[in-house]
Amino acid sequence: MAEMIVTPWEVKGEIDYDKLLLEFGLKRIDEKLKKRLQKKLGDNIFLRRGIFFAHRDLDWLLDEYDKKNYFYLYTGRGPSGHTHLGHLLPWIFTKELQDAYNTKLVFQLTDDEKFLFSSTLSVGDVEKFTNENILDIIAVGFDPKKTEIYTDMRNAKDFYPQAVRVAKHITFSTAKAVFGFENDSNIGKIFFTSMQAVPAFIESVNKGKNVPCLIPHAIDQDPHFRVTRDILPKLGYYKPSSIQCKFIPGLGKDGKMSSSEPETCIFTIDTSKDIERKIKKAFTGGRESLEEQKKLGGNPDICPIYQYFYNLFEEDDEKLEDRFRRCKNGKLMCGECKQDLIPRVQKFMKEHQERREKAKKLVSKFLVK
Amino acid sequence: MAEMIVTPWEVKGEIDYDKLLLEFGLKRIDEKLKKRLQKKLGDNIFLRRGIFFAHRDLDWLLDEYDKKNYFYLYTGRGPSGHTHLGHLLPWIFTKELQDAYNTKLVFQLTDDEKFLFSSTLSVGDVEKFTNENILDIIAVGFDPKKTEIYTDMRNAKDFYPQAVRVAKHITFSTAKAVFGFENDSNIGKIFFTSMQAVPAFIESVNKGKNVPCLIPHAIDQDPHFRVTRDILPKLGYYKPSSIQCKFIPGLGKDGKMSSSEPETCIFTIDTSKDIERKIKKAFTGGRESLEEQKKLGGNPDICPIYQYFYNLFEEDDEKLEDRFRRCKNGKLMCGECKQDLIPRVQKFMKEHQERREKAKKLVSKFLVK
């Protein structure tokens, strides 16, 4: 089994979420909290299936909400490449939260980060991906009246002065301990977490009063928000609450979907043909031969195809369970299963791409000048 | 003799400029270079008396100028307090350069730095001093058509994205070696030198072609520009040239004029009465008693009062020499010498304050939106 590595910049190996929960000091979303969320969100598969599974201070946030001290949402994207399915999942959940709680959303694109942490991307490359990614964000369907998209570089006027306030409270030792920096790390990387902290209190700055903040995000980003939570009370703001999801796996073996391995990712710019090719080539939990699989059954637990149904493409629990069982029993072969998935992903992407096309005219409604 | 400490944030002890020149790797302005400058600047006391005494690549810059590849000027101010005489000196020289070479000037106020490096200043305090200092800058008489005043926080939109490009090439090791940072230094301090680098190439960014840059500054700021000079060629820009001045001493014993010891500084907001009081209380190179001084003579070499005449308040070399000689010979007593200085400083400040008052209406002409 490959060693698990989960940092904001690298996710590798088989992910042990129980271990991560303990290491990061997160709380599991228990039945009581899940029900409380479901009252507003309805029967949401991300909650029901434990895809969003962990949190910090979410109970406090909901208490405040009940007292009419309403929260806003903050999530983000590092524009280092094209958007893929793995990115969309937490954004879709964030949109559902926005709709259910009728909240404002601050969406941050960390263009500075992606330039500072990459050995290959130019400022121009990052700008290009920023513009591309913004279309995908808008295509998810966020409310233009309640959503503000910021990029660190373009909105530096609002962000840098606030980041400086955060930075004053973070020592190099802390940044080193949390993010693993070394003496040869560049000083932009070292400073960067201060910029990622800003959306967690920018609404309080703009409103001139404390506003609770909820950050839905993939679990690898938690180290940033651990630091943010330590600092914000020192500046007189609430600690942000957060809710964490698991990764949607790539189509290869192990690990999350990653743009650095393009054939294992389904991008929002992929054609139906690309989707078909990538899924057909995908790793599965199947056996070496059809005979063997019929005899021994497949292993859906390690199968990205099954994970796709689980995460996004089979909302019906009974049908999902049936698929699981038929795989295990050697009744469902990988080819058939892939054939079931392909048109669903194609349809999903086609609809996204139509909204993405329309998004081109909406960009200015979302950007903060 | 107090140990010499010269960093961008601390200047202490008796300054050995020859040693600094060697340590920092600066070149002395030789007779040939001085004459070359004087052709344009005329008989300037700052050059004649070696107050601006060191440089980097100034000969190259003047060669480019002769080839009609014209430079611009960059200087700055850390807004941590009220402006004092020590700050004005390099600004006055910068204005003379602007007039003589008919150049643009980029003036940077490092409000982020002063907040990040201070244990007492709030963002609001720094903002207040920024606004105050801007009036003094304008009062020096820079050409509003050829001068742009930036502050790091207010102009972060222009500055931060460029600073990120610089930061990518500076490691923590380098920042530590140059500036003496430790593991407990805050990450804003560590990043800061990237912001101070930006005005050295912002004109090239804005013009879309390489423009030579000359930075007149007090010698303590050289470590920043050493780093800047290492990085800019990696981004495709010229190394900035620079020209360094000595410090105008405080009215106490040793060291430069420092706002942290207000009674040893003459501020631009001081009244004539303040000026009189501070000069009367000043340390001098005089003896313990009048008799002794008449017998042994005074020591103008260690005397801030003499330094004031030398730096700003006695343009006539013969009269200055006469004052030096009469002090040495025990003919000129400290009381008389101070009485000579007081009205000159009062007049200088009164005129500055009149221009400072008028500057209030000119601010918007200098600020970059």
Image (cartoon, coloured by chain):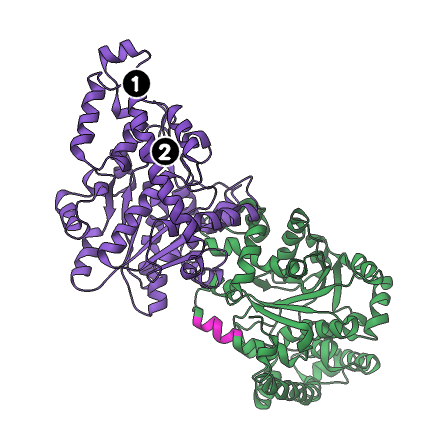
Chain colours: A purple, B green
**Residues packed near mark 2 inside 10 Å, few (<14), some (14 to 19) or many (20 plus):** many
Percent across and percent down for residue B256 are 62, 69
How far separated are the C-alphas under marks 1 and 2? 19 Å
**Residue designated by label 1:** A286
Q: Residue at 37% across / 62% down in the picture? A: A202
Residue placed most toward the observer, A113 or B240: A113
State the SS at label 2: loop
Callout 1: SS: loop
- The answer to whether dots 1 and 2 both sit on one chain is yes
Q: What is the x, y in percent for residue B337? A: 71, 85
| Horizontal side of residue B188 vs A54, given as left or right | right
Q: Residue B125: within the magenta?
A: yes
What's the residue type where badge 2 is placed? Lys
Find disc 2 in the rendering and name its residue. A256
Picture quadrant where residue A277 is located? top left
Where residue A213 sits, quadrant-wise, is bottom left
Residue at 74% across / 72% down in the picture?
Answer: B98
Asked if residue A128 lies left or right of residue B62, the reply is: left
State which quarter of the image contains the N terminus of chain A.
top left
Q: Is residue A296 magenta?
A: no
Which of label 1 and label 2 is nearer to you?
Answer: 1
At a point 18% along the width and 50% down the height, the residue shown is: A37
* Boundaries of the magenta span: B124-130
Asked if residue B305 can be seen in this view, the reply is: yes
The chain to which mark 2 is attached is A
Give the main secondary structure of the magenta stretch. helix
Q: Earlier in the sequence, mark 1 or mark 2?
A: 2
Say what amino acid the circle numbered 1 marks.
Gly
Question: Any mark on residue A57, and which?
Answer: none
Q: Decide: marks 1, 2 in contact (CB < 8 A)?
A: no
Residue depicted at 17% across the width and 53% down the height? A40
How many dots with numbers?
Answer: 2
